[in-house]
Amino acid sequence: MIGKDEILRRGYVDVKVYVTGLRQSHRLEVVKEKTSVGMVPFLVCKHYIPTAELVRLAEQLQLPVKHKEVVVFPKGKMASHFADKVEKTTKGVHAVVEAETVEAEVEAEEES
């Protein structure tokens, strides 16, 4: 069995899954997505795979698996376990502070 370090290094993994009773071969590609905890590597499949098979793959490969809006993590893990930690620095940050502006409309008075 291929390890998760090897999968991340290669950038893909070929798997066998059951879809509606048929055994199929699929290639899952490693895609790093930006989340609130940092860059998280997901195994993304282009074709439909049932959720039960996604759970099995996540457990077997010990990496998060994603298909469209369905994201499956291995049992007991979440995005922060897989995130690449990036140190936040203020070097090179340029901030512009502007005076607060007030917008108002003037209504014309009606003459009687």
Image (tube, rainbow, N blue to C red):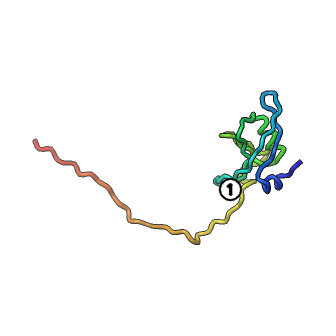
Residue at point 66% right, 52% down?
33
User: Alpha-carbon neighbours of circle 1 within 10 Å: few (<14), some, or many (≥20)?
Assistant: some
Residue at point 87% right, 50% down?
2
Residue 4 point in image, percent of width and height: 82, 52
Q: Quadrant of residue 67?
A: top right
Q: Is residue 55 left or right of residue 2?
A: left
Residue 51 point in image, percent of width and height: 75, 35
Residue 91 point in image, percent of width and height: 58, 72
Residue at point 11% right, 44% down?
111
Secondary-structure class at tag 1: strand
Q: Residue furthest left?
A: 112
Residue at point 67% right, 55% down?
37
Q: Quadrant of residue 10?
A: bottom right
Q: Quadrant of residue 69?
A: top right
Q: Residue furthest bottom?
A: 91
Q: Is residue 17 above or below residue 99?
A: above
Tally of numbered discs: 1
Q: Residue furthest top?
A: 21
Q: Is residue 101 above or below residue 4?
A: below
Amino acid at the residue labelled 1: Met
Residue behind mark 1: 39
